[in-house]
Amino acid sequence: MTLRLYMLQRITALLMAPLVIGHLAVMIYAIQGGLSAAEILGRTQGSVLWFAFYGTFVAAVSIHGAIGLRTIAAEWGGLRGIAADALMWIVGLGLFVLGAQAVWAVTYP
Amino acid sequence: MAAEALKITIDRGPNAQGLQTEFEVPAQDNQTVLDVVSWIQQNADPTLSYRFACRVGMCGSCAMMVGGVPRWTCRTHISKVLDGNAVTIGPLRNLPVIKDLAVDMDPFFDKWVAAEGVHHGGLTRDDPIAVVDETAPARVEANAGIECINCSVCYAACDTVTGNADYLGPAALQRAWTLLNDAKDEGRVAILDAVSGNGGCHNCHSMGSCTAYCPNDLDPMSAIAGLKRETAKSFFKRGRR
Ligand code: SF4
Ligand code: SF4
Ligand code: FES
């Protein structure tokens, strides 16, 4: 864990804290009176705000989670150097692609 | 307690085939773990290897695993660590064993240097002696760590060292923090760089085994937290390392 990875992980943690709270708050608000795909899409489709909200969320999760898993793989699995970094990039990019697809699917107008 | 015999098991590692590992040691009213080990070496098995020098908690050479935890054996009363009348004594964790209870301390001291735990002087003999204000906050921080005796107890207690051989460890990083706060040390940039790399202070999980086991009641965990704060500040000021 270098200073750069440490800072990236702390900064993404700071970003995620309000995003998680916002996400939970909207969930509680949204399920009042039932939940339907149409209702959700009505809120998110074409919305620059929700695109930015969940886009930032996905980027932060990908970075934060990938660095965390790299540390676990290094300390518990003995992964070193390039192998550890490769795992971090694969996990990070994988999470980002999955998340970005979902964000795009619900916000594209 | 006197007259009773203590049942001492010495962990001599996988190469101990044929060597005696169980010993009966006469109990005394006042007896340290080091006394027990010395009794075995002098009276039962002269081939037993171990290390000590000062016997008064100054030199830091007598640390061993006692009942599974790292301790300075010359200042640990045997009665404090007995389970019934038995205890197991082994070589310090996280360091290569040379023989029996003697470990190779080289990795520990090499990391001390790798963390820039060396003096970075800026003055010459012609300069006046720098005045040190004992009440300055930085001096108070530095003073908190200077009584380290290099015993490696904290290094043996640290699970992060176990999981990551590159990690510099609590003692070396604490020394780096001490020097960073020392008005007479001019190695600020070198120290911050040295503790920001792959094995640097950011690997610490702040679980505090180092602080819990340090026999001198030092607090390497908080020193490392200080390094994390300073490196984070310099990250924004100087840009990435
Ligand atoms: S607080 Fe940090 S240095 Fe101390 S034992 Fe835990 S990981 Fe090791
Ligand atoms: S910090 Fe404490 S436990 Fe660690 S080497 Fe120094 S005196 Fe020993
Ligand atoms: S023998 Fe010197 S500290 Fe124990």
Image (spheres, grey):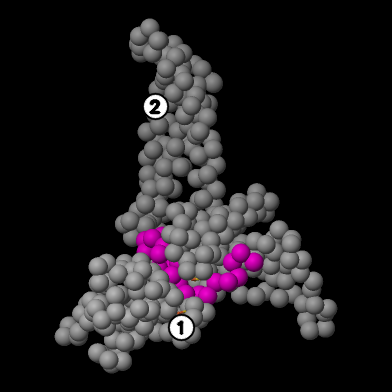
Q: Residue drawn at (42%, 37%), measured in percent from left and top? A: A96
- Is A94 located above or below residue B157 in the figure? above
Mark 1 residue crowding within 10 angstroms, few (<14) / some (14–19) / many (20+) = some
Type of amino acid at the residue the image marks with label 1? Arg
Q: Tell me whether circle 2 and circle 1 mark residues in contact (CB < 8 Å).
A: no
Q: Which residue is mark 1?
A: B55
Q: Quadrant of residue A37?
A: top left
Whether B144 is among the magenta residues is yes
Q: Residue drawn at (54%, 21%), measured in percent from left and top? A: A49
Q: Report the chain holding disc 1.
A: B
Type of amino acid at the residue the image marks with label 2? Ala
Q: Nearer the viewer, residue B91 or B71?
A: B71
Q: Which residues are magenta?
A: B143-164
**x and y percent of residue A78 in the render?**
33, 60
Q: Nearer the viewer, mark 2 or mark 1?
A: 1
Q: Secondary structure at mark 2?
A: helix
Q: Residue drawn at (41%, 62%), measured in percent from left and top? A: B158
**x and y percent of residue A98 in the render?**
37, 33
Q: Which residue is mark 2?
A: A102
